Image (cartoon, rainbow, N blue to C red):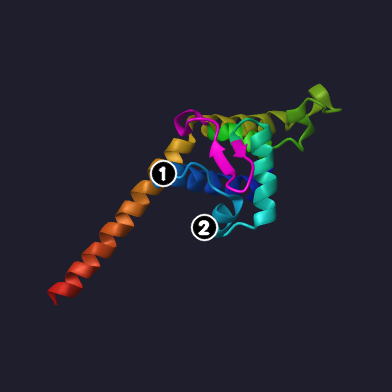
Amino acid sequence: MALTVKSSYALRALFELAVLTKDEGKERVTISELSERQNIPKDFLEKIFSELREAGILKSIRGKYGGYVLAKDPKNLKLSEIVKVLDNPLQSYDCITGECKLEINCAVEFVWKRVHNAMILELDKLTLQDIIDYGTAVANLERAKTLDKESVEIDS
């Protein structure tokens, strides 16, 4: 029922990809670099990015200097799109897929449909840009704390 590590890895790697291409000006980023920077198994990340490429979320550039870029602006990339490609939450429940044999006699169908709808609605509200903004804010706070500590040490 829960989201898997696959979606978590994807969101972390997409965040890193967006930051590297926007903030550091890279035209493309390799799986190896993303894997190393986010501590994600390279083979697993390759599979994830292959699925995201097929879904039109990423573009791949082949060749010696190849890598990946986002196919969409982070502001327009809903987290629900990413999660549906990789995990499709609650799809193991027959009532969500429409294949329930009990049909009208199922007393818990409404529970799983409500949970599924709530999850997708929340993920629809969030974009990759929201993750980027949050990550940037956290990084800025950490830099400010480091500068404050260094300032205190210098003053001592």
Q: Is residue 150 left or right of residue 90?
A: left
Do residues under tags 2 and 1 come within 8 Å of each other at their CB atoms? no
* Range covered by the magenta-colored residues: 59-77
| Amino acid type, residue under disc 1 in the picture | Gly
Q: Residues within 10 Å of mark 1 (few under 14, many from 20)?
A: few
Rendered-image quadrant of the N terminus: top right
Query: Rounded to the nearest whole Å, what is the CA distance between mark 2 and mark 1?
Result: 16 Å
Of residues 64 and 137, which is closer to you in this image?
64
Mark carried by residue 37: 2
Tell whether position 70 is magenta.
yes
Asked which quadrant contains residue 145, the reply is bottom left
Rendered-image quadrant of the C terminus: bottom left
Residue 114, percent from left and from top: 63, 30
Can residue 136 be seen in the rendering of this structure? yes
Q: Is residue 143 above or below residue 23?
A: below
Q: How many marks?
A: 2
Name the residue at 69% across, 54% down.
Answer: 43
Residue where numbered disc 1 is placed: 25
Q: Is residue 10 left or right of residue 92?
A: left
Tell whether position 95 is magenta.
no
| Amino acid type, residue under disc 2 in the picture | Arg
